[in-house]
Image (tube, grey):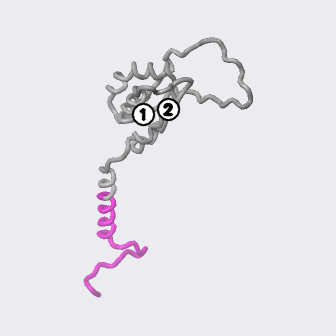
Amino acid sequence: MSGAPEGRKDGTGTDEDIMRLTTRGLLLAAALAALPLPAAAECGLCARSVVVNSQLATCFLEKYPQLSAREGAAVAVDLEDCEQERGVIAPLRGPQAHATVQPSMKFILSLAQLACLKQKLEQPGLTLDPAVEIDLGAC
């Protein structure tokens, strides 16, 4: 017999081999976790886009200081208590009319996405009515 350690009967190698591979795997996982990623990729539950109108945008901007001061990697945004315009019922549209996208009333954003949404809503000339979808995927 030689001095080389024999593998296990199941063919998986020695305990030392398994420990070395496990350690390498953990080191690789730690290195990958340290890489910078876009905010949306870090938060699996965060919205990739939100739909707002002018009333919801104003309400969001008013709530922004409280939302941005929260601790944690993600913030739950609830705009359901915001004042919505309640006027006369709009006339029925013809069959060729496009369906209006409903505004996002509750959604989760990372802190970076929260700041990005604020910045996008403050852009001059942004048309918010009847509603606009704001892409947060690149934030």
Q: Say above or below: 46 vs 104.
A: below
Q: Which residues are magenta?
A: 1-27
What residue sits right under mark 2 in the picture?
Answer: 50
Q: Quadrant of residue 70?
A: top left
The mark nearer the N terminus, 2 or 1, is: 2
Percent of width and height locating residue 118: 39, 28
Which residue lies most toward the right here?
95
Crowding at dot 1, Cα within 10 Å, few <14 / some 14-19 / many 20+, comes out as many
Is the Cβ of the residue at disc 2 closer than 8 Å to that at disc 1?
Answer: yes
Helix or strand or loop: what does disc 1 sit on? strand
Q: Nearer the viewer, residue 126 or 85?
A: 126
Q: Say above or below: 19 vs 119.
A: below
Residue 26 falls within the magenta-colored stretch: yes
Percent of width and height locating residue 57: 46, 23
Question: Residue drawn 54% across and 16% down?
Answer: 84
What residue sits right under mark 1 in the picture?
Answer: 109
Tell me which amino acid carries mark 2: Val
Which residue lies most toward the bottom here?
1
Give the label, 2 or 1, closer to the camera: 2
Looking at the rendered image, the quarter that the C terminus falls into is top left
Q: CA distance from mark 2 to mark 1?
A: 10 Å
Q: Say above or below: 75 vs 85.
A: below
Query: Along the horizontal axis of the image, is 83 left or right of 124?
Result: right
Question: Residue drawn 32% across and 30% down?
Answer: 71
Which residue lies most toward the left here?
3
Looking at the rendered image, the quarter that the N terminus falls into is bottom left
Crowding at dot 2, Cα within 10 Å, few <14 / some 14-19 / many 20+, comes out as some
Query: Along the horizontal axis of the image, is 112 left or right of 96?
Result: left
Percent of width and height locating residue 9: 41, 76
Question: Residue drawn 36% across and 73% down?
Answer: 13
Question: Residue drawn 42% across and 27% down?
Answer: 121
